[in-house]
Image: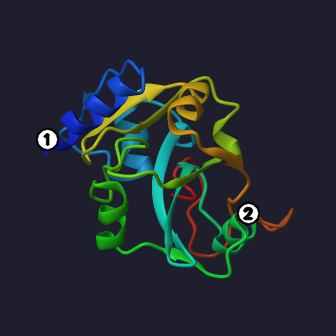
């Protein structure tokens, strides 16, 4: 696992990004876990999610407070079919395991989108290669180093509906 963090750090250096990787033994695999460990809002956690759009991998950098709506993602991408990548497909596309996938350092270029909800935040935290490692950055730096396209692809609840059954209320909702 340390090798994954070193690969991430090398990619960060190559991109001109100075990173301070912080490790949390209790893990940061979910957005709620990461927010608790770091001491920030769930919305500030960057979930690096891999999808398959018409058979091609796409990375969606998503606010920890949001869930990706595959239909909206398909519309943004102009794709007929979008689905979550399998763990094997995600690793093949990024070189990292699910739960610790950083936003950079992939073996080849992958189309990338960034959740517009992340862009108004002063600081965000993203995975640094393993489920227990994260790093802080700004949305502007994240845009610069990833080349991601800002887009709106999160689920949106109709006004007045409140939380849907089965979804918890509070800071962890939507993880």
Mark closest to the chain's N terminus, 1 or 2:
1
Q: In this rendering, would 154 be left or right of 4?
A: right
Q: CA distance from mark 1 to mark 2?
A: 34 Å
Q: Residues within 10 Å of mark 2 (few under 14, many from 20)?
A: few
Q: Residues within 10 Å of mark 1 (few under 14, many from 20)?
A: few
**Badge 1 is on which residue?**
3
Image: 88 above or below 96: below
Which residue of the protein is positioned furthest toward the front in this rendering? 108
Label 2 sits on a secondary structure element that is helix
Q: Nearer the viewer, residue 138 or 23?
A: 138
Q: In this rendering, would 103 be left or right of 99?
A: right
Q: Residue at x 73, y 70 (%)?
A: 78
Instruction: Residue 45: give x, y in percent of width and height.
Output: 49, 41
Which residue of the protein is positioned furthest toward the right in this rendering? 159
Label 1 sits on a secondary structure element that is helix
Q: Residue at x 47, y 50 (%)?
A: 47
Image: 65 above or below 125: below
Instruction: Residue 21: give x, y in percent of width and height.
Output: 29, 27
**Badge 2 is on which residue?**
76
Q: In this rendering, would 136 be left or right of 41?
A: left
């Amino acid at each position: 696992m340390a090798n994954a963090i070193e690969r991430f750090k090398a990619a960060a250096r190559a991109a001109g990004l100075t990173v301070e990787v912080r490790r949390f033994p209790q893990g940061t695999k979910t957005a709620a876990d990461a927010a608790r460990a770091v001491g920030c809002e769930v919305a500030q956690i960057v979930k690096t999610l891999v999808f398959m759009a018409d058979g091609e991998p796409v990375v969606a950098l998503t606010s920890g407070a949001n869930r990706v709506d595959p239909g909206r993602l398909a519309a943004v991408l102009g794709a007929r079919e979008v689905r979550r990548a399998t763990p094997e497909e995600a690793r093949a596309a990024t070189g990292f395991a699910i739960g610790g996938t950083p936003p950079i350092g992939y073996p080849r270029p992958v189309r990338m989108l960034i959740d517009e909800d992340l862009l108004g935040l002063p600081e965000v935290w993203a995975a640094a290669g393993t489920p227990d490692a994260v790093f802080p950055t700004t949305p502007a730096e994240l845009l610069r180093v990833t080349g991601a396209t800002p887009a709106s692809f999160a689920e949106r609840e109709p006004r007045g509906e409140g939380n849907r059954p089965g979804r918890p209320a509070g800071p962890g909702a939507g993880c």
